[in-house]
Amino acid sequence: MDDLLVIIPTRGRPDSVTAILDCWRRTGATADVLFAVDDDDPMLAGYREHMEQINDPRIHWHTGPRLRLCGTLNEVAVDVASRYRFLAFMGDDHRPRTQGWDERFRICLSGGPGVVYGNDLLMGERMPTAVALTSDIVQTLGYMAPPSLVHLCLDLCWLDWGRGMERITYLGDVVVEHMHPANGKAAMDAGYQECNSSEQATADATAYYAYRDDGGLEADLAKLRALVEEVA
């Protein structure tokens, strides 16, 4: 078992499994990967085919009720945090491109609690759309992203945490490409339509600002700063 687990919530895109694992092979990655699948996914049969055919101890699966992206990520991350030193999130539309990207993440996080992210070729340094962090952050907070969120704005929280802890690193030369309609690298499918709807954007933005401005962020940062001092 590796000490880094990459959690990938996925829905409606079983073909992404093959594409992502190809990126692991091409970049020499040794990180474990866990695909989190909804048990009501219309494309579940496609995922089950991968589950049956892929025989690799690094590849893990979680199938459960649909909790949306943030809910699924939190359920899995909390469950596995005690077994991995580092946890990462990628969407099923992220593609690592840089040789040894996972080792770069480990090196950055090896000094203690913190956050690291690469260049997604869309948001760059402005936003960690894919992220890695030390698992003690999840154990301390009880989640990998504020549970009031559904799909959007998780990356803003990771940025807030890292900056608030003064423990965040951006690796501009480590490419984790975001294959997204916003940069013309993916078609606008049902998944994108749902999570990028004006209703969802408004709901998640409202939840984020409430978390940031009404005491939630400050409470979490107090715990995270104490964690940094504890292990220093």
Image (cartoon, rainbow, N blue to C red):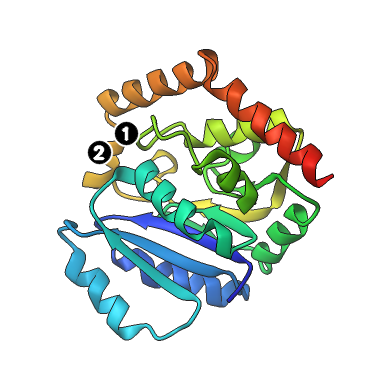
Position in image of residue 66 (x %, y %)? 24, 49
* The N terminus, quarter of image: bottom right
Amino acid marked by disc 1: Asn
Can residue 77 be seen in this snapshot? yes
The image quarter containing residue 163 is top right
Q: Residue at x 77, y 50 (%)?
A: 112
The residue that disc 1 covers is 196
At numbered mark 2, what does the secondary structure look like: helix, strand or loop? helix
Q: Is residue 40 left or right of residue 80?
A: left
The residue that disc 2 covers is 193
Q: Tag on residue 8?
A: none
The image quarter containing residue 42 is bottom left
Can residue 134 be seen in this snapshot? no
Q: Residue at x 28, y 45 (%)?
A: 67
Q: Image height check: is 226 above or below 9?
A: above
At numbered mark 1, what does the secondary structure look like: helix, strand or loop? loop
Q: Is residue 5 left or right of residue 52?
A: right
Q: Nearer the viewer, residue 52 or 139?
A: 139
Position in image of residue 211 (x %, y %)? 48, 21
Position in image of residue 121 (x %, y %)? 57, 46
Q: Nearer the viewer, residue 190 or 45?
A: 45
Mark 1 neighbour density, 10 Å: few (under 14) some (14–19) many (20 or more):
some
Position in image of residue 5 (x %, y %)? 55, 63
The image quarter containing residue 14 is bottom left
Q: Image height check: is 127 above or below 31?
A: above
Q: Are marks 1 and 2 in contact (CB under 8 Å)?
A: yes
Q: Residue at x 51, y 42 (%)?
A: 142
What separation in Å lies between label 1 and label 2 (alpha carbons)? Answer: 5 Å
* The C terminus, quarter of image: top right
Q: Residue at x 60, y 42 (%)?
A: 140
Amino acid marked by disc 2: Gln
